[in-house]
Image: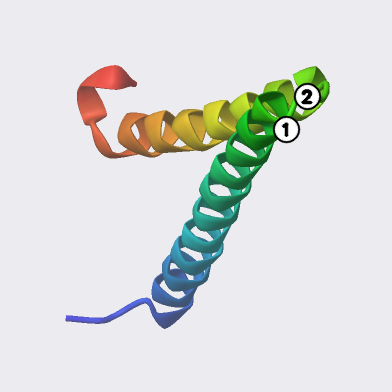
Amino acid sequence: MKIDWAALGTVAVVSIVMSVLFTVLLASGIRAVSAARLRQQRGGGSGAVLAGGYSLLGLAGLLVLFGIWLIVPQFH
């Protein structure tokens, strides 16, 4: 049996990068939505921040759905 070390390294690097990207998107989205809600409670405008936060959360969700699509062979 021969192990393709280059392919294993590629999978490891892509997994780590996507995990970090997902974490950053999710944390930034949660932070933006929370900041927008606090700004709304204080009486300030926060529509753009709230929309940005929800779009970051949506991107994180799309990243998860893309990963599921890659894993499940019936979806191809």
Q: Earlier in the sequence, mark 1 or mark 2?
A: 1
* Proximity of marks 1 and 2: CB atoms separated by less than 8 Å: yes
* Mark 1 surroundings within 10 Å by alpha-carbon count, few (fewer than 14), some (14 through 19), many (20 or more): some
Q: Quadrant of the C terminus?
A: top left
Q: Position of residue 31 (x, y in %)?
A: 60, 46
Which amino acid type corresponds to the residue marked 1 in the rendered image?
Arg
Q: Position of residue 48 (x, y in %)?
A: 81, 22
Which amino acid type corresponds to the residue marked 2 in the rendered image?
Ser
Q: Which residue is mark 1?
A: 39
Which residue corresponds to the image point at 40% horizontal and 37% vertical from the top-left? Answer: 64
Which residue corresponds to the image point at 69% horizontal and 24% vertical from the top-left? Answer: 40
Taking the image as shown, residue 13 lies to the left or right of residue 2, namely right
Which residue corresponds to the image point at 47% horizontal and 59% vertical from the top-left? Answer: 19
Residue projecting furthest to the left: 1
Taking the image as shown, residue 73 lies to the left or right of residue 69, namely left
Q: Position of residue 20 (x, y in %)?
A: 54, 63
Which coloring applies here? rainbow
Q: Which residue is mark 2?
A: 46
- Image height of 15 relative to 44, above or below: below
Marks 1/2: CA–CA distance:
6 Å
Task: Give the secondary structure at mark 1.
Answer: helix
Which quadrant of the view contains residue 24?
bottom right
Q: Position of residue 23 (x, y in %)?
A: 50, 56
